[in-house]
Image (spheres, rainbow, N blue to C red):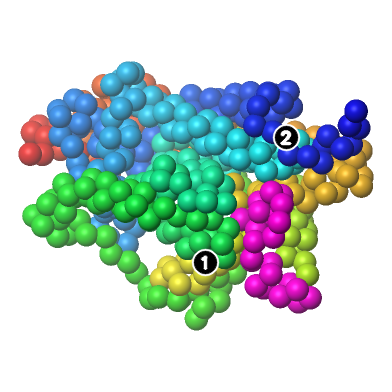
Amino acid sequence: MSSPAAATRRPSGSGGVDPVVALVFVVGLALSLLLALRSQVGGDQLNLLARGWLLVAHGEWVPFGNPSSSGGAVPGGLTALLVAAPLLVWRHHRAAVLALLATHVVAFVLLDRCVREGLPARERRLFAVVYWLNPWRVLLSGFLWNPGYLLLLGAVHLWSSWRQRERASFGASLALALAIGLGFQIHPSVVLLAAATALLVLTGHTHLRWSGVAVGAALSGVTLVPWALAVAREPAQLPVSEGFPFRGLVLVFPLLRGVLYWLRHASLAVAGPEARFDFAPELGAAFARPVKLVADGLVKGVGNIALALPLFANLRLWRGLLRRGLAELLGVRPGRRAWVAGYARIAFAAAILTYAAAPTTVMWWQGASLLHAAVLPLALWGGAMARRRRRLTHRVVVAWGSVAVLVAVLMAFGGRRFRCGGWDNIVIPLREDHAMLHDLAIDESCHIAIRPDGWWPDVLPSAGAQPPR
């Protein structure tokens, strides 16, 4: 009979439900639902909802995505389909958020399947905590935004790479090609997944069936035909880019910023704008101030201190670089756990190369597709530590999960994306009223001021105009 200690060292297998993972999943899902059912609608959300609403209400498919910050629009009409589908079931703006949350559930199932096959049960549980309860993951699951869909694409990337670690598969190669090809219609930062795939193939960590890649690329290309026709009529919709190639290497700061975000994505330190709490709309001015002081201290203080753990985890992952050399560290080493560690290293290397070549400064949401890879070093290091200091590691994990839950609750009731009113709220004035605001119950979630100088969604016709033809 094998000992309990030996059981924790072997991969957790492909079947069975782990009670700890199940509990973490339920808690994380509840947090995501809390945020999703409190989500508010700002400019990016109105642009997305307008595309879905025009398709559902008027049969008009907008063949390009949200406007790009540097000009033009994201290629392809996939976002309109993603938003329209849930509106067919429930004509409410939060239906699209719940559908986005469903993609996170699928992503977790795919990731957990790979992790339980590749790592011992202890690491599988640690991964569930640091990924599923991750404040960045919970945040992206709670409101409608393009980067929220990237987590599913990242999960498909790990799943397909894992499936093809020994031999190529048509289905897995097709899925990977579709994830990257269609992903460009969601957010251009999926170039991270393309770079990681190239490095995985070059180092022998994964294999590709080129027929599957070709079919996936062809299908992705076909979906861009309506966009290409639209751009021929309206060239202004072509996306443009500011800056210059390899800006990260020349200016250095953008590259360092990318490294910092890799560490922060595995921590409890959420992005600054998302930690600008205001509890006055919920608690009133008198009670809101002390609660805000405690919340700021927790999120900024504890969150920044917690950055030390991802830093140590990544240093441990890369230790021995000078002794063994980069080729051996990136090359395939025997064992499933070693493959997972290699995947994390390659994902980091791909991120650094991409950030170095990027023409613009890295923003936090651009690394969302590799969030799963960013937390892997933490799960691997935590598993190694637990084998030597089990009780201490258990306490740290419980504390980590508890703080993560508290941060999510604070965002739900004080974060700018999940409250109506208060300072820095994302709900902005519009220049006129519109049927979409009432049809999708946007005005019921939060009053929208109507002003002559207000903002307006890029594809939504004026109230008295006909939908675009």
Mark earlier in primary sequence (1, 2)? 2
Q: Amino acid at mark 2?
A: Ser
Image position of 320 with respect to 141: above or below: below
- Above or below, 456 against 448 in this view is below
In the rendered image, residue 242 lying in the magenta stretch gets the answer no
Determine which residue is flagged by label 1.
Answer: 202
* Mark 1 residue type: Leu
Q: Is residue 94 above or below residue 192?
A: above
Q: Residues within 10 Å of mark 1 (few under 14, many from 20)?
A: few
Magenta segment: 321-343
Residue 322 is a magenta residue: yes
- Label of residue 12 in the image: 2
Secondary structure found at label 2: loop
Query: On the rendered image, what quadrant is the N terminus found in?
Result: top right
In the picture provided, is 18 more to the left or to the right than 282?
right
In the displayed structure, does residue 197 sit left or right of residue 257? left
